[in-house]
Structures are given as structure tokens and as C-alpha cells.
């Protein structure tokens, strides 16, 4: 079962802990609907780009279209030694909450 972080919590992590917001969709999907402050690291690149672009000591919040690719990205980052990785699920969750 895939567990998603509530978007209010994700927004609080970004605001208070400087969490990194990572869109693991394709560059085309990213261009069509960007979230403010998100960086695009497609799932197929997360294992080798993520380790260089992201800071391990900061929380990471990953998301995609449905939550499946971001779940896989979360597992990869955790296996690479990132301490705190959260799955927001769908990028649409972002706009469905206040916070």
C-alpha cells in the first residue's frame, strides 16, 4: 500500500525545513504543469541525478501524475541514504489543499 504525505504537511516541510520538492514526471509533463519551486528529475534519472542534485540532509518530497512513479523514486532515494523522503502522490494534490 502506498502512503502519501498530506499536502499541508508537505507544504509545511518546504516552508519550515527547506524540503526539496521533486517532480519525477517526464520533462514534457513537467513543462505542461509545474508546481512552484519544484525541480524536475524524471524517475529514470533519479538514481544518478538525484544523488548529485539533492541534499541528503534536507527532506525530499516527490510527486508525479498518480503517485506510482514517485513511490518508486522514494524507494530509490531511501536506498541511497536519504533520511527523509515523502511521497506527495499526484501533483494535483498540491492545489487541493490550503497551506
Image (spheres, rainbow, N blue to C red):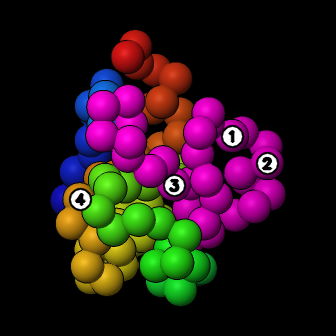
Spot occupied by residue 41 in the image (x, y as percentages of width and height): 60, 66
Spot occupied by residue 95 in the image (x, y as percentages of width and height): 52, 23
Check disc 3 and report the residue beneath it. Answer: 22
Closer to viewer: mark 1 or mark 4: 4
Q: Residue at x 30, y 40 (%)?
A: 17
- 53 vs 98, left or right, is right
Of callouts 1 and 4, which one flags the residue occurring earlier in the amino acid sequence?
Answer: 1
Residues marked 2 and 1 touching at CB (< 8 Å): yes
Spot occupied by residue 31 in the image (x, y as percentages of width and height): 79, 48
Q: CA distance from mark 1 to mark 4?
A: 23 Å
For the residue labelled by badge 2, is the local secondary structure a helix, a strand or a loop? Answer: helix
Check disc 2 and report the residue beneath it. Answer: 31
Residues marked 1 and 3 touching at CB (< 8 Å): no
The residue range painted magenta reads 14-43
Q: Residue at x 44, y 50 (%)?
A: 20
Residue 6 versus residue 58 in the image, above or below: above
Q: CA distance from mark 4 to mark 3?
A: 13 Å
**Number of residues whose C-alpha sits closer than 10 Å to that of mark 1, classed few (under 14), some (14–19) or many (20 or more):** few
The numbered mark at residue 34 is 1
- 82 vs 98, left or right, is left
Of callouts 4 and 2, which one flags the residue occurring earlier in the amino acid sequence?
Answer: 2
Check disc 4 and report the residue beneath it. Answer: 84
Amino acid at each position: 500500500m502506498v502512503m502519501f504525505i498530506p499536502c499541508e504537511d508537505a507544504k509545511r516541510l518546504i516552508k519550515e525545513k527547506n524540503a526539496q520538492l521533486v517532480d519525477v514526471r517526464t520533462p514534457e509533463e513537467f513543462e505542461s504543469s509545474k508546481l512552484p519551486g519544484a525541480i524536475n528529475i524524471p524517475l529514470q534519472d533519479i538514481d544518478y541525478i538525484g544523488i548529485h542534485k539533492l541534499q541528503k540532509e534536507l527532506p525530499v518530497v516527490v510527486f508525479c501524475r498518480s503517485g506510482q512513479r514517485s513511490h518508486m523514486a522514494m524507494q530509490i532515494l531511501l536506498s541511497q541514504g536519504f533520511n527523509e523522503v515523502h511521497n506527495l502522490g499526484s501533483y494535483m494534490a498540491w492545489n487541493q489543499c490550503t497551506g
